[in-house]
Image (cartoon, rainbow, N blue to C red):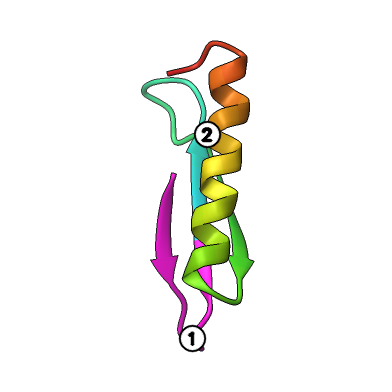
Amino acid sequence: MQIVPGLFGDWGLVRNWGRIGSSGQLRTDWFDTEAEAKDARHELHMEKAKRGYE
């Protein structure tokens, strides 16, 4: 997961997943502020950690 700036002052949380060696899937969720994007990244990270992902 990474946070990227948008063209219009918004911020995107980019997630990429899939099997190793394949192109996988890509999803970008847009937020008004960088802080909102960081909060969303933290929440997703904590959800994955509960399921055993690193």
Amino acid carrying label 1: it is Gly
Q: In the picture, which quadrant includes the C terminus?
A: top left
Vertically, is 25 above or below 32? above
**Residue 15: percent from the left, percent from the top?**
51, 45
- Which residues lie in the magenta part? 1-12
Q: Residue drawn at (57%, 24%), measured in percent from left and top? A: 48
Residue 45's disc number: 2
| Rendered residue at 49%/53% (across/down) | 14
- Screen quadrant of the N terminus: top left
Q: Is residue 44 left or right of residue 38?
A: right
Q: Amino acid at mark 2?
A: His
Q: How many marks?
A: 2
Residue situated in front as seen by the camera: 33 or 6: 33
* Residue under the image location 55 percent in, 53 percent down: 39
Q: Is residue 13 magenta?
A: no
The disc label shown at residue 26, or none: none
In the rendered image, the vertical position of residue 39 relative to residue 15, given as above or below: below
Q: Is residue 51 above or below residue 1?
A: above
**Foreground label between 1 and 2:** 2
Residue 9's disc is 1
Q: Position of residue 45 (x, y in %)?
A: 52, 34
Q: Secondary structure at mark 2?
A: helix
Are circles 1 and 2 on residues that touch, CB within 8 Å?
Answer: no
Q: Who comes first in sequence, dot 1 or dot 2?
A: 1
Query: Residue 21's x, y, as percent?
Result: 36, 23
Numbered disc 1: secondary structure: loop
